[in-house]
Image: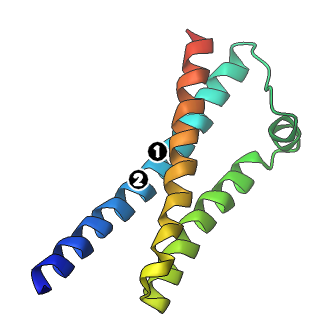
């Protein structure tokens, strides 16, 4: 029984690390490809992102979003130690996957 618990614990730890890595890589990819696209004459299709880019606050808001998507699940999972809160890792994983998809789409538009 202890070995099953340890295996699940290690698996969840690796999934959690992967979720955070996907989120950071996706955010960086989105930022880089958006900046390259804007320099090449493309326009931002997202009205909110365009307004934030225009006001110079896009990087700050993106950094705060990434930080909150890492800090909140990490803290809640460490404080509660309940299995019910493990689903919170899905949020940074989903956001990371979506940001990687946006990065690939931006790259497609650039090329």
Evaluate if marks 2 and 1 touch, with contact meaning CB atoms under 8 Å apart. Answer: yes
Q: Give the residue pinned by disc 1.
A: 25
The residue positioned 53% from the left and 69% from the top of the image is 88
Task: Please tell me whether mark 2 sits on a helix, a strand or a loop.
Answer: helix
Within 10 Å of disc 1 (Cα), the crowding (few <14, some 14-19, many 20+) is some
The residue positioned 87% from the left and 34% from the top of the image is 47
Q: Give the residue pinned by disc 2.
A: 21
Q: Return the residue found at the far top.
A: 111
The residue positioned 69% from the left and 13% from the top of the image is 40
- Where residue 92 sits in the image (x, y, percent)? 53, 57
- Where residue 52 sits in the image (x, y, percent)? 84, 44
Task: Please tell me whether mark 1 sits on a helix, a strand or a loop.
Answer: helix
As rendered, which of 76 and 107 lies closer to the eye?
Answer: 76
How far is disc 2 from disc 1 in space, using C-alphas? 6 Å
Quadrant for the N terminus in the image = bottom left
As rendered, which of 39 and 48 lies closer to the eye?
Answer: 48
- Where residue 89 sits in the image (x, y, percent)? 48, 65
The residue positioned 53% from the left and 82% from the top of the image is 76
Residue 51 falls left or right of residue 60 = right
Measured along the vertical axis of the image, is residue 108 above or below residue 53? above
Residue 25 falls left or right of residue 111 = left
Residue 51 falls left or right of residue 3 = right
As rendered, which of 94 and 84 lies closer to the eye?
Answer: 84
Label at residue 78: none
């Amino acid at each position: 029984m202890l070995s099953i618990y340890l295996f699940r614990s290690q698996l969840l730890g690796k999934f959690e690390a992967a979720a955070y890595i996907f989120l950071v890589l996706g955010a960086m990819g989105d930022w880089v490809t958006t900046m390259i696209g804007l320099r090449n004459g493309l326009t931002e299709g997202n009205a909110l992102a365009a307004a934030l880019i225009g006001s110079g606050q896009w990087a700050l808001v993106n950094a705060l979003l990434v930080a909150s998507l890492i800090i909140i699940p990490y803290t809640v999972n460490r404080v509660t130690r309940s299995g019910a809160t493990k689903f919170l890792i899905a949020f940074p994983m989903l956001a990371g996957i979506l940001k990687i998809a946006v990065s690939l789409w931006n790259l497609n538009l650039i090329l």
